[in-house]
Amino acid sequence: MSDPLFDLDGRVAVVTGGSGQLGRTYVTGLAERGARVASFDLVPGEEVEGVRSLEVDVTDRASIDAAVREVVSAWGVPHVLVNNAGLDSPPDAPAEEVGPFEEYPEESFDAVLDVNVKGAFLCSQAVGGEMAREGRGSIVNISSVYGLLSPVQELYEFRRAQGETFVKPVAYSVSKAAILNLTRYLATYWAKSGVRVNTLTLAGVWNDQPHEFLDAFATRSPMGRMLDAQEALGALVFLASDASSYVTGSNVVVDGGWSAW
Ligand SMILES: NC(=O)c1ccc[n+]([C@@H]2O[C@H](COP(=O)([O-])OP(=O)(O)OC[C@H]3O[C@@H](n4cnc5c(N)ncnc54)[C@H](O)[C@@H]3O)[C@@H](O)[C@H]2O)c1
């Protein structure tokens, strides 16, 4: 039996970065709850019943507009936008990206800010504006504990023990902190138009990381483990659905207690 509070039947959702680890979880989870879901990603994703995969670069307004037109003509104006597309420094990032702050490349800073901040800004402009004209909608901006707090550099000690230089870079943290106030700005801007805007903040997600990293993370985490991607879904469904009808401008933190001590 579906719960009307959390019902997404017939809703239309756009998930950016829908081909990634968390994006796939959101696309499938929303579709399983009755929503029609469009994934906007550089990389094509799986198309199943109720899911469309559109090739979109979230840093390019023309590319976003073309995809939004396609969604609107097929399904109507979206009810939900999840600004999830993101860049972080991958484990195999070139040495200069994970070197000392003083040497962090300006181009890397621009690239991360472009996707993580400008991408969310442009998609909110394109989709949120349409939602406001309809007088309803929910935007969920994805942030990270690294946007609330500084990265714990000790987590990466094992990389240094192997003789590498490794500093978790600055751009990701700066970009994820910016998301918090993009949310507050848009929440108040659209509050009377019926468009709610919230942040969903996550801790590190389990992705078969090296055991030295998992052990260090577990020591630092009150719950003693990383987030399973599926555990982000409950809060997303809450924020996307009418269950959160009076929630706007807020930050739902799903971090196993990471920020509590
Ligand atoms: N994985 C974690 O530990 C973690 C923790 C906290 C928050 N987050 C956040 O969750 C979100 C998703 O992370 P993930 O771990 O699934 O990452 P991921 O790398 O698996 O997926 C990101 C997706 O974004 C897409 N993308 C990148 N640039 C794009 C662009 N210009 N246009 C369109 N799509 C683009 C990529 O192709 C990819 O499919 C990110 O915003 C990330 O910051 C992740």
Image (cartoon, rainbow, N blue to C red):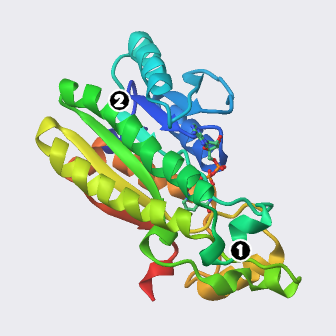
Picture residue at 50% right of the left edge, 24% below the top: 63
Q: What secondary structure is marked by label 1?
A: loop
Disc nearer the start of the sequence (2/1): 1
Up the image or down, 214 lies above or below 125; here it is below
Q: Amino acid at mark 2?
A: Ala
Whether label 2 lies within 8 Å of ligand 1 gets the answer no
Tell me where residue 215 appears, x and y as whole percent. Answer: 75, 83
Up the image or down, 258 lies above or below 123; here it is below
Q: How many other residues sit within 10 Å of disc 2, few (<14), some (14-19) or many (≥20)? A: some
| Residue indicated by mark 2 | 126
Picture residue at 68% right of the left edge, 28% below the top: 44
Q: Residue furthest left?
A: 192
Q: Residue furthest top?
A: 73
Tell me where residue 102 appears, x and y as whole percent. Answer: 61, 77
Observer-nearest of 120 and 141: 120
Say whether residue 197 is left or right of residue 109: left
Q: What secondary structure is marked by label 2?
A: helix
Tell me where residue 249 appears, x and y as whole percent. Answer: 25, 56
Q: Is residue 27 visible?
A: yes
Q: Is residue 33 visible?
A: no
Picture residue at 21% right of the left edge, 31% below the top: 132
Up the image or down, 150 lies above or below 135; here it is below
Observer-nearest of 187 and 150: 150
In the image, which is nearer the foreground, mark 2 or mark 1?
1
Q: How many other residues sit within 10 Å of disc 1, few (<14), some (14-19) or many (≥20)? A: some
Label ID, residue 99:
1
